[in-house]
């Protein structure tokens, strides 16, 4: 089959786009506003964009029902810092709960019963028990076009300035992904867990 995205003439009951770029890593992002209100939310339009220096991006794809931008976007653009916590299979329910649309002064750590621990270099807290946490500072936002008038579609890029790794997931000097079991986003309501890896040598 072939469809044109502007016509959405795929003939399927659901738009398949999010199922076509899989798996997407989940950036479980903690942030806070300038008043100190703390926030936690998952973003799967998320990835590393380069490693020298290490930088990451996430994007918020629409606005809240009252037209306001999502808390994570607001916090990062105004306060300037965020933490990317790796979401694992163990944390799957809490990660999902933290995607609830709460008001700005409600803390999703408390709502999802996730324990906060302080960061080392920045103000927003980290997720206790998440084996990898990246402390980031805001670099730049890129306004993207939107097909839904009134929505905010914005990609945010941050620079990673501090990295926490649970020593238990380092085996023979390497990160053992099988010990972490990161969860990833697929399309629809589907997720996958990474618990099986294979190696290949690159050609010369
Ligand atoms: C696994 C998962 C991935 C998500 N990825 C995104 C995303 O990439 N962009 C986005 O705007 N919303 C995404 N959402 C929805 C947000 O998490 C949700 O709108 C949340 O309430 C935003 O919280 P905030 O306003 O506290 O930032 C995702 C939800 C889940 C469960």
Image: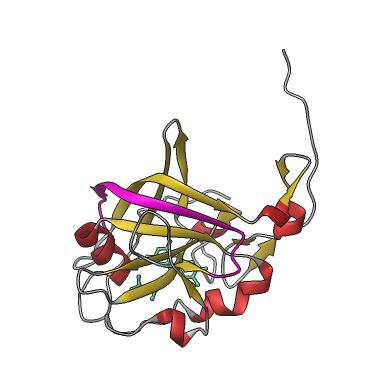
User: Which color scheme did the rendering employ for the protein?
Assistant: secondary structure
- Residue 113 image position (x, y, % from top left): 52, 85
Residue at 35% across / 66% down in the picture?
31
- Residue 106 image position (x, y, % from top left): 33, 85
Residue at 45% across / 35% down in the picture?
50
Residue at 26% across / 50% down in the picture?
144
Q: Nearer the viewer, residue 170 or 71?
A: 170
Q: Nearer the viewer, residue 200 or 16?
A: 200
Is residue 147 among what the camera can see?
no
Query: In the figure, residue 63 lies in which quadrant?
Result: bottom left
From what the image shows, is residue 201 above or below residue 156?
Answer: above
- Residue 23 image position (x, y, % from top left): 61, 54
Residue at 72% across / 12% down in the picture?
204
Is residue 46 among what the camera can see?
yes
Q: Quadrant of ligand 1?
A: bottom left
| Farthest-out residue, top | 204
From what the image shows, is residue 16 above or below residue 5?
Answer: below
Query: In the figure, residue 41 lies in which quadrant?
Result: bottom left
Q: Nearer the viewer, residue 164 or 26?
A: 164
Residue stretch in magenta? 128-148
Residue 119 part of the magenta segment: no
Query: In the figure, residue 186 lies in which quadrant?
Result: bottom right
- Counting labels gives 0
């Amino acid at each position: 089959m072939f469809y044109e995205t502007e016509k959405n003439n795929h003939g399927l009951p659901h738009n398949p786009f999010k199922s076509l770029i899989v798996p997407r890593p989940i950036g479980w992002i903690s942030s806070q506003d300038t008043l100190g209100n703390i926030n936690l939310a998952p973003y799967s339009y998320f990835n590393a964009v380069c490693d020298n220096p290490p930088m990451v991006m996430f994007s918020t794809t629409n606005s809240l029902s009252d037209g306001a931008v999502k808390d994570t976007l607001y916090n990062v653009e105004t306060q300037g810092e965020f933490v990317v916590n790796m979401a694992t299979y163990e944390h799957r329910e809490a990660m999902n709960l933290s995607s609830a649309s709460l008001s700005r002064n409600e803390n999703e750590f408390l709502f999802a019963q996730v324990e906060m621990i302080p960061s080392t270099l920045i103000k927003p807290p980290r997720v206790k028990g998440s084996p990898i946490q990246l402390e980031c500072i805001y670099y730049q936002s890129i306004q993207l076009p939107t097909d839904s008038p009134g929505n905010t579609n914005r990609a945010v890029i941050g620079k990673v300035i501090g990295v926490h790794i649970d020593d238990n997931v380092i085996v023979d000097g390497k990160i053992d992904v099988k010990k972490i079991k990161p969860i990833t986003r697929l399309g629809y309501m589907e997720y996958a867990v990474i618990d099986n890896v294979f190696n290949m040598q690159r050609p010369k």
